[in-house]
Amino acid sequence: MGFKDFQLKMAKKLRLKKLIGKEGGNKKKGSENGKRLPWMMPITHGYYVAEENRDGARPQTPQSNKVECDKVVVQREQIEEQEWWFCGVFDTRIGGGVTKYLQAHLFDNNLNESQMKKKSKETLKKAHVHAKAKVRETEKLESTWKMGSASALVINGERLVLADMGEYKAVVCRDGEAFEINRRQQQTTKPHWSHKLFSAAKRSPKAGADKRSKRSELVVGSERIDRDTEFVILASPGVWEVMKQQEAVNLIRHLEDPQEAAECLAKEAINRMSKSNISCLIIRFE
C-alpha cells in the first residue's frame, strides 16, 4: 500500500468516527428534549349540579354552597414530578368513602411513581367496593342497588383510569365519538344485530329479575390519553335517562370552557324533564 493510499484510508476512518460521534450526541440531546413534562397537557374542568326538586331548581357550581343531591369531588395531587387529578360524581352515601380510601391507600401510602401507576386501577376499584360495603352494613340491600358513581383518575395528563357504577356513567369523547369505559363501541342510530338480540333477551323474566343487579355493577377501565382524547363526561342518572352518550358529546363538543359545557348539559337534561338528580362534571384535555 502506498503512502497516499494509507492517508486516504486514515481520512475515511476519521470521518466515520466523527459521524458516529455526532449521531450519538444528537440521540442524547433528543432524549433529553423529548422528556414529557406534566404541564405539556393542560387539564381544565367544570361541574354543575341541580337539586332533585325541579320546582325552582337551584344549581350548584364550584362557587356555590355544598352539594345536596350528589357529591362532586375535584382533587389535585402532586406526587414527585407527576400531577394526579381525581374527579368524580357520586351518590352522597359513597362519595366520602371512595375519596377517603383513595387518599389513604394511594395518595398518602408513600408509594413511588411506578407503584402508584400500577396500583391506580385496582385501588380505584377497591375504593368503590369498600365504600359500597360500608353502606350495606347500615342499609337494606335493595336501597344499595340505586347507589352509583362516575369517577376518573388522570395521571400526569397521559393516562385515564375510569370507573362507573349504577346509572352513573363515565364517557370519553375521542375525536368526536362517544365511548363508555370498557365498552369501546360507539353508539349508533342503527343497532348491531347483537344489540337487538341482547335487548330481546332482557325482556325474558329471568333477565328482568337481574336488571337491577346488572345496573349496580362496577366497571373500571384504563386507557392512554392521546391527541384524539378531547374530554370526559362524568354524569348522574338524570342526564342519561333523557339522552344518549353521543347526543351529550355532540351537544357540548364545541364548547371549550368545561364549566360552560357542564351547565349546558345539565340544563338540557332539565329542559327534557329529567326526573332524576342531575350532576355533570367535564374534564377537558387541551
Image: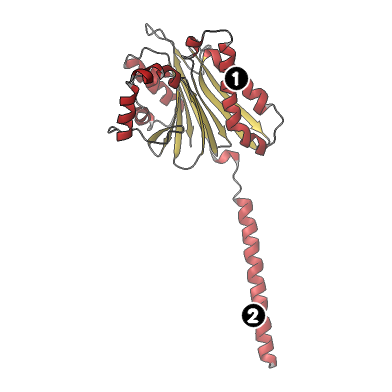
What amino acid is found at the position of numbered circle 2 in the picture?
Answer: Lys
Residue linked to disc 1: 130
Q: Residue at x 58, y 16 (%)?
A: 133
221 is higher (above) or lower (below) than 266: below
Q: Is residue 149 above or below residue 140?
A: below
Give the image quarter of residue 13.
bottom right
Question: In this figure, which residue is indicated by the disc labeled 2?
Answer: 12
Looking at the rendering, in which quadrant would you find the N terminus? bottom right
Q: Locate residue 136 relative to residue 205 in the image: left or right.
A: right
Q: Which of disc 2 and disc 1 is earlier in sequence?
A: 2
| Residue sitting at the far right | 110
- Residue 76 x/y as whole percent: 60, 27
Look at the numbered disc 2 and give the secondary structure of its residue: helix
Q: Where does the image place residue 61, in percent across and percent down from the top left?
A: 48, 17
| Marker count (numbered) | 2
115 or 46, which is in the foreground?
Answer: 115
